[in-house]
Image (spheres, helix red, strand yellow):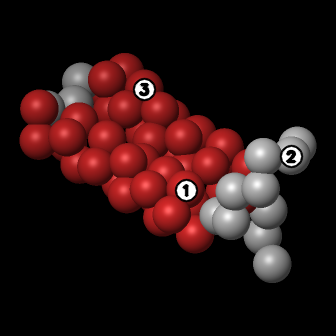
């Protein structure tokens, strides 16, 4: 099983890295930005909803 922290960090790295690379290349449009943000939000929602919260770290 993959730890949730690793999954969240990987998803956020992908989203922010893709946004950065697209902006540097000059191909970042509003649609692509919304796509990357939607992917990040969906992955975070999946991780949060699939986690059993017990209140301990």
Quarter of image, res 37: top left
Residue appearing at x 31%, y 23% in the figure: 23
- The tag on residue 20 is 3
Would you say the residues marked 3 and 2 are in contact, meaning their CB atoms lie under 8 Å apart? no
The answer to whether marks 1 and 2 mark residues whose Cβ atoms lie closer than 8 Å is: no
Q: Which residue is mark 2?
A: 56
> Could you tell whether 42 is left or right of 12 in the image?
left
Please tell me in which quadrant of the rendered image residue 50 appears: bottom right
Labels 1 and 2: the sequence-earlier one? 1
User: Residue placed at 23% from the left, 36% from the top?
Assistant: 33
For label 3, the SS is: helix
Tell me what residue is drawn at x 57 percent, y 61 percent: 47
> Which residue is farthest front?
55
Asked which secondary structure carries label 2, the reply is loop
Q: Which tag, 1 or 3, sits closer to the chain's start?
A: 3
Q: Please name whichever residue, 13 or 53, is drawn nearer the observer in this view of the structure.
A: 53
Q: From this view, report whether residue 50 is shown above or below residue 7.
A: below
Q: Is residue 27 above or below residue 1?
A: above
Left or right relative to 54: residue 39: left
In percent of width and height, residue 31 lies at: 11, 41
Crowd around label 3: few <14 · some 14–19 · many ≥20 (10 Å):
few
Q: Which residue is mark 1?
A: 48
Residue 57 in view here: yes
Secondary structure of residue under mark 1: helix
Q: Is residue 17 above or below residue 9?
A: above
Of labels 3 and 2, earlier in sequence is: 3
Real-space Cα separation, disc 1 to disc 3, in angstroms: 25 Å
Compared across the picture, whether 32 is left or right of 22 comes to left
């Amino acid at each position: 099983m993959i730890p949730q922290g690793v999954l969240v960090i990987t998803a956020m790295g992908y989203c922010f890295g893709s946004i950065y690379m697209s902006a540097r290349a000059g191909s970042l449009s509003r649609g692509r930005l919304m796509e990357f943000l939607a992917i990040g939000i969906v992955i975070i929602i999946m991780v949060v909803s699939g986690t059993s919260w017990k209140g301990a770290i």
